[in-house]
Image: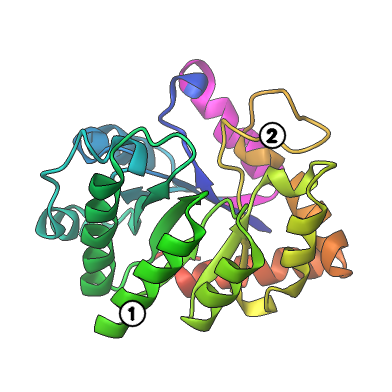
């Protein structure tokens, strides 16, 4: 059994065949999928998908790309929306300095707002971190000093320093199809060192399809290919990797039902 801890089933890429996408995932041994919110103002669409399909769970939050679109999202609003039984996480929120779609100050404000919601609810914060390692680590350390909260660095592509500092704070790390790419040797080396009880796997679909599907639209069933490479990088059987990442999912996403 595997869990796709991060996908975007509300994206138009899936609109024409969503039932088939979910069915293929189940046929591939994927028991649960978490469809991740990028805009609080579109949360109703996310929630509807989670309500429609038993294996689908969801989060609530504003992506850093949309931080300037939704500057008025409050911790109280996130907490209230997260009460829905299918909501198992806050986010995704964080920092993206690659595109800088939203001003960095707006991204940081949103990040801290979501951290407060994770702290209050006990739900894990799904963190987007791209080319912002030092600021992400600094904010996590500052906010943890104010009170611990569960969190996951999703689609990890950062350096070893952020991994080390996040793990020291009790965080988890999730790897996507990027780990299967030929030039991801450093990333595979980092993945090999993450403690067994802190590692997860995801697709981030419809993006970043793993080899041998690179270049195609990604989907939750492809998480098996990522898990195979992750197991190889760690030098363990696929079944052991699947078991560990699934256990870790239910530990971190404690609201999810097995």
Name which quarter of the figure residue 256 lies in: bottom left
Q: Secondary structure at mark 1?
A: helix
Highlighted magenta segment, given as a residue range: 15-31
Please state the horizontal and vertical placement of residue 12, each as a whole percent of the image: 44, 20
Graded by Cα atoms within 10 Å as few (under 14), some (14 to 19) or many (20 or more), the crowding at tag 2 reads many
Graded by Cα atoms within 10 Å as few (under 14), some (14 to 19) or many (20 or more), the crowding at tag 1 reads some
Residue receiving disc 1:
144
Q: Is residue 61 visible?
A: no
Along the line of sight, the residue nearer the viewer: 32 or 93: 93
Q: What residue is rendered at 65% in x and 48% in y? A: 176
Mark 2 vs mark 1, foreground winner is 1
Residue receiving disc 2:
209
Please state the horizontal and vertical placement of residue 67, each as a whole percent of the image: 26, 41
Compared across the picture, whether 227 is left or right of 143 comes to right
Compared across the picture, whether 74 is left or right of 46 comes to left
Q: Secondary structure at mark 2?
A: loop
Cα separation between marks 2 and 1? 33 Å
Question: Main SS type for the magenta part?
Answer: helix
Please state the horizontal and vertical placement of residue 235, each as a whole percent of the image: 89, 69
Along the line of sight, the residue nearer the viewer: 168 or 82: 168
Q: What residue is rendered at 12% in x and 53% in y? A: 74
């Amino acid at each position: 059994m595997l869990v796709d801890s991060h996908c975007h089933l509300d994206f138009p890429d899936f609109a024409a065949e969503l039932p088939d996408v979910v069915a293929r995932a189940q046929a591939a041994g994927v028991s649960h999928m978490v469809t991740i919110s990028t805009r609080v103002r579109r949360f109703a669409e996310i929630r509807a998908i989670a309500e429609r399909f038993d294996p689908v769970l969801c989060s609530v939050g504003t992506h850093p790309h949309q931080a300037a679109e939704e500057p008025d999202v409050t911790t109280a609003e996130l907490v209230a929306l997260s009460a829905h039984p299918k909501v198992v996480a806050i986010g995704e929120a964080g920092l993206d300095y690659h595109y800088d779609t939203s001003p960095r100050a707006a991204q940081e404000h949103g990040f801290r707002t979501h951290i407060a919601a994770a702290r209050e609810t006990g739900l894990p914060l799904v963190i987007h971190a791209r080319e912002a390692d030092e600021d992400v680590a600094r904010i996590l350390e500052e906010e943890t000093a104010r009170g611990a909260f569960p969190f996951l660095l999703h689609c990890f592509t950062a350096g070893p320093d952020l991994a080390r500092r996040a793990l020291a704070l009790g965080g988890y790390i999730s790897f996507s199809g990027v780990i299967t790419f030929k030039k991801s040797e450093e990333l595979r080396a980092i993945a090999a060192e993450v403690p067994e009880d802190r590692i997860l796997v995801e697709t981030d679909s419809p993006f970043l399809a793993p080899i041998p599907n690179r270049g195609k639209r990604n989907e939750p069933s492809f998480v098996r290919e990522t898990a195979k490479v992750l197991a190889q990088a760690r030098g363990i059987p696929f079944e052991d990797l699947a078991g560990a990442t699934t256990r870790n999912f239910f530990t971190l996403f404690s609201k999810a039902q097995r």
